[in-house]
Amino acid sequence: MLSYRHSYHAGNHADLIKHLVQTLLIEKLKTKDKPFIYIDTHSGGGLYDLASEQANKTGEYHDGIAKLVNRGFSKSMPLPFAELVRELNADQKKLRFYPGSPLIAQKLLRPQDKLLLMELHSKEVEVLQKNLQGDRRTRVLNQDGFASLIGALPPKPARGMVLIDPSYELKEDYYHLVETITDSVKRWPTGTFAIWYPILGKQRDRSGWLLRKLEKICQSNLLVAELTVDEQQPEFGMHGSGMAIINAPYQLDQNIEKHLELIHPKIAKNVDGKKLGGWKIQWIKESN
């Protein structure tokens, strides 16, 4: 399925929780001197212009990153990757550029670390390679992320994380994800897997099903963080999303929680003075 382009959705509330967890995991890996690898299965273009026709067709960033950015990009922005957002917009009078997960990883990783980026859409790969500017630490594959991930494991170096965030445009994505995670944790039992998933209207939501499948697959620990910004609708709409983290590091739950406490009130829908939605952190499975 090649119709999905993340440029229509960049900087929305789903990106905020996804990139929050991604950044906290990378910073945790950096607490040790040993090198690690960052793997991204659905990389996209890496950098998004919020002034583009695609971004403004949906305008989703207005209810996401735009609500966190104060005039002058003050340091009160409650995001661990806030400095990167400020750098990207240093020459702009207002918010214009938003980083995708590959660019966030590239900026945060050290010289000894590696990036392995996968993207099926050939046009997105061209944009991604341009945005990364020939980074020697980085390998970009124009391939299906599900199939390529299994073939890349176990990686070298043996420390690291995988970010998996398919579009879920097709129901098959859920099944492919479960199959991929099943094989991947067998091949790399010590790796950290961060899986993004949407929370949809009641008739279409499959997040509960997915988490039950991941619980059965997971052999160690499984941490879930969710952020919703509106009430659940009967059928359509994505009012929130979550991150399921296999092999979550110590105190990750506390670090996510303190950020969501600040982020949710700023981006949640407000009806008659009441903030809708909410956030939760839950250990679905904890290590013994």
Image (cartoon, grey):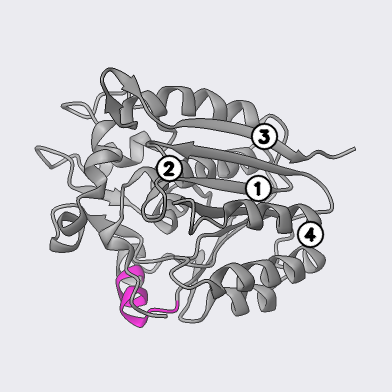
The numbered mark, 4 or 1, whose residue comes first in the sequence reads 4
Q: Secondary structure at mark 2?
A: loop
Judge by depth and name the residue closer to the eye, 183 or 63: 63
Seen as rendered, the residue at the extreme top is 273
Do residues under tags 2 and 3 come within 8 Å of each other at their CB atoms?
Answer: no
Q: CA distance from mark 4 to mark 1?
A: 12 Å
Q: Nearer the viewer, residue 271 or 23?
A: 271
User: Relative to 267, is 92 on the left or the right?
Assistant: left
Q: Which mark is residue 282?
A: 3
Which numbered mark, 3 or 1, is in the foreground of this view? 3
Q: Are marks 2 and 4 in contact (CB under 8 Å)?
A: no
Closer to the chain start, of discs 1 and 2, is: 2
- Of tags 4 and 1, the one toward the viewer is 4
In primary-sequence order, the first of circles 4 and 3 is 4
Tell me if residue 255 can be seen: yes
Q: What is the distance, in whole Å, between disc 4 and disc 3 at their CAs?
A: 17 Å
The tag on residue 232 is 2
Which stretch appears magenta? 120-128
Q: Position of residue 53 (x, y in %)?
A: 13, 62
Is 127 in the magenta? yes
In the rendered structure, which disc, 2 or 3, sits on the residue that comes first in sequence?
2
Rendered position, 251 above or below 110: above
Q: Write down the quadrant of residue 132 in the picture.
A: bottom left
Q: Position of residue 11 (x, y in %)?
A: 31, 47
